[in-house]
Image (spheres, rainbow, N blue to C red):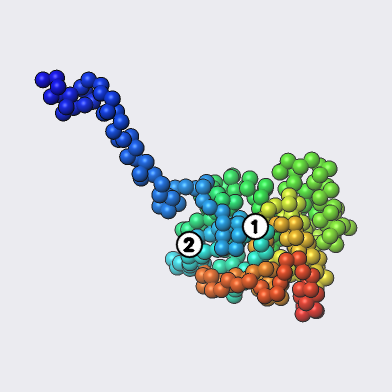
Amino acid sequence: MSSTAGASDPVRGPERPRFPRIPRPRLPRARTPRPESSAPSATPATPGAGPHGEAVLRVRGLVRTHRSEGSAVRALDGVDLDVDRGEFVAVMGPSGAGKSTLLHLLGGLDRPDGGQIWLEGRRVDGLSEARWALLRRRSVGIVFQFSNLVSTMTVADNVELPALLAGASARQARTRREELLGELGLADKARAVAAGLSGGEQQRVALARALVNEPGLLLADEPTGSLDSRSTRDVLRLLTRFHEQGRTIVLVTHDARVAATAERVVSLFDGRVADDAAVESAPRGRRTTLADVLELKG
């Protein structure tokens, strides 16, 4: 009786050395190594390599629809984009192509309706506004199309404030501010109130503010759009130096001559990537393009 039970039900029968050796616990292991199907849930572990090297920024299937008075406009329609660490990318396209919308999504200033955004190997499109604010403070600098300075504060305070919020000492913030304003030809404007500056001066102050924390990624929306030739030269020189330090830049511009300072140009049309090409004969850190830009602008 007991031998029959033992034969039919080895778990309840007497212990026998051969039965525990049956590899039943190993069965689940045959299903685990399937990385190709686990991408949606593997938020922190996404690979960080893009087609050109190590992708610091990765966008997949990005969709954003603006709704107004009952109508819907698809500003972005399934945009895919990889930006490598240390790369300088210009984004071009006609008005309404989705350039500024893309930049706002990359900086966490707007939320996509669909798709994914990865920054430094981490998915960020679902972050809270508070987490995005911390990320921008530490890692992402943004230059807006319209400077967005605090108009009642001085130039010095506008530039130093992000550094102080990020934990820099007053001396460190002041030193960094003096360096940036000097490079942008604004050293004598430090005590001026932002509201009293010209549009071009405000835009240069906005660039200094975006760079004060030395972010790894700079997002710039038409940073030279309201500048004269001299100011354009100062801004492009600073961007070039920032790029030469290994920082990543994504710059939106209407001006093909300014885009020529980048290593790569991505063209948007009707919310989609229409073209993505490297700039021919444009080695990193070259200076000749700046002269070309100034000559054509003058």
Quadrant where the C terminus is found in the figure: bottom right
Q: Is 81 displayed left or right of 246 in the figure?
A: left
| Local SS, label 2 | strand
Q: Position of residue 28 (x, y in %)?
A: 34, 40
Dot 2 or dot 1: first in sequence order is 2
| Quadrant in which residue 170 is drawn | top right
Mark 1 = which residue?
85
Question: Can residue 158 be seen?
Answer: no
262 and 5: which one is in front? 5
Mark 2 = which residue?
61
Q: Write the residue at 41% across / 47% down.
A: 33
Q: Nearer the viewer, mark 2 or mark 1?
A: 1
Q: Amino acid at mark 1?
A: Arg
Q: Is 260 displayed left or right of 123 in the figure?
A: right
Q: Position of residue 32 (x, y in %)?
A: 39, 44
How packed is label 2: few (under 14 Cα within 10 Å), some, or many (20 or more)? some
55 and 272: which one is in front? 55
Q: Position of residue 114 (x, y in %)?
A: 46, 58
| Local SS, label 1 | loop
| Quadrant in which residue 53 is drawn | bottom right
Q: Write the residue at 59% across / 44% down.
A: 130
Compared with 103, 280 (above or below) is below
